[in-house]
Image (spheres, helix red, strand yellow):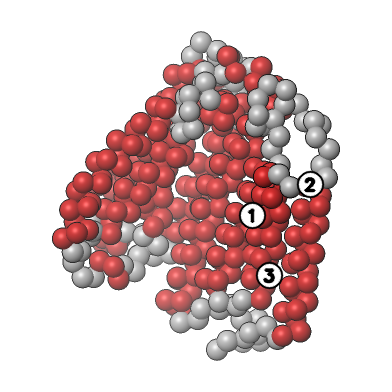
Amino acid sequence: MQAPQLYVLAGAALVGLGLYSLFADRHLLRQIIALNIMGGGVFLVLIAAAKGGQFGDVDPVPRAMVLTGVVVAVSATALALALAGRLHRMTGASQLTIGDED
Amino acid sequence: MSNSVPVHLRMLLAALAALMSLVLSASVLTLPAGTSDLADSVFSLMDKSGADHPVTAVLLNFRGYDTMLEIGVLLLALVGVWSFGPAPPDPATLAPAGPVLDSARSVLLPMLLIVAGYLIWVGASAPGGAFQAGAIVAAAGVLAMLTGWRPIPALRPAIEVGLALGLLVFVGVAGGTLSYVGTILLLPEEAAGSMILLIEVAATISIGLALTAVYLGGSPSHWAETR
């Protein structure tokens, strides 16, 4: 098996691991980390699947898209972390609970 | 109060996650090769793009619209973080920083800023560019904040102008190309290189300031008192 196929498998494994942790762990911080791991897995799959045309080795368009995706993921993580911190400061809770609303 | 997921649901989730990984890898590994000619289009237009590196050309010329919206997303996240009220005091700075961190800061900060400037310049022909340099500037800002620096109210106008600068320059270029060339963000061939450099410098300042400000986790505490 060559390197690109290995990276695709690794990226897919990361997506699966992140998905499991996102739903199975209840602590907000772990869910945010799980989302980041899923994002990392998606980027790995995109880069590994980028095959060049007849001119060059690697397709530059997915690489540019992943650069954009990294920045957007960082912004979303920053907002999510600030929200989680604010929730903790206001209510002391570190998990989201589905319960009866009163 | 913890509501942990029961074991049988965990096993179902693990099975579903494994299934997702399998479907993802199978569908990507069996993609037919050679169905997209985007790479060929990019490489054949490289001499008109104003940059020597294909990724920079795609980011700032061919798909400049995406990059402009990306800077907008970063600013939007910052506005969201700032809307949460004053930032909590950072536990790392409640005690004064030790001598090692202080001397590391005085050596590293100028070096980080120089490396960021170099990355903007070299982005035209090698991996680099605005976002990488902006991340280095943000690292310098976070290092400064770890040693106790906080933005004082007098700096507020400069910081707000710096934050808006990247998006403003990009939108200005977009408006200019729309009115003079007819197509939005279609950089004219002879000026493409300098326009890319201008956009990158403004974007680096903006991105570095935005990422540094977002590290605080709220709006800078002294700013609320000046209104």
Location of residue B146 (image quadrant): bottom left
Q: Nearer the viewer, mark 1 or mark 2?
A: 2
**Residue assigned mark 1:** A41
> What label sits on residue B195 in the rendered view?
none
Is B170 or B34 nearer to us in this picture? B34
Whether labels 1 and 2 share one chain: no
Q: Is residue A46 left or right of residue B80?
A: right
Q: Is residue B36 left or right of residue B67?
A: right
Tell me what residue is drawn at x 64 percent, y 71 percent: A21
Sort mark 2 into few (<14), some (14-19) or many (20+) by Cα contacts within 10 Å.
Answer: some
The answer to whether any part of residue B64 appears in the image is no
Q: Is residue B191 left or right of residue B226?
A: right
**Residue assigned mark 2:** B29
Mark 1 vs mark 3, CA separation in Å: 13 Å
Residue placed furthest toward the front: A1
Mark 1 vs mark 2, CA separation in Å: 15 Å
Mark 3 vs mark 2, CA separation in Å: 22 Å
Tell me what residue is drawn at x 51 percent, y 10 percent: B190
Look at label 3 and name its amino acid: Tyr
Residue placed furthest toward the top: B190
**Residue assigned mark 3:** A20
Q: Secondary structure at mark 3?
A: helix
Label 3 resides on the chain identified as A
Sort mark 1 into few (<14), some (14-19) or many (20+) by Cα contacts within 10 Å.
Answer: many
Look at label 1 and name its amino acid: Gly
Tell me what residue is drawn at x 65 percent, y 38 percent: A62
Report the quarter where the C terminus of chain A lies: bottom right
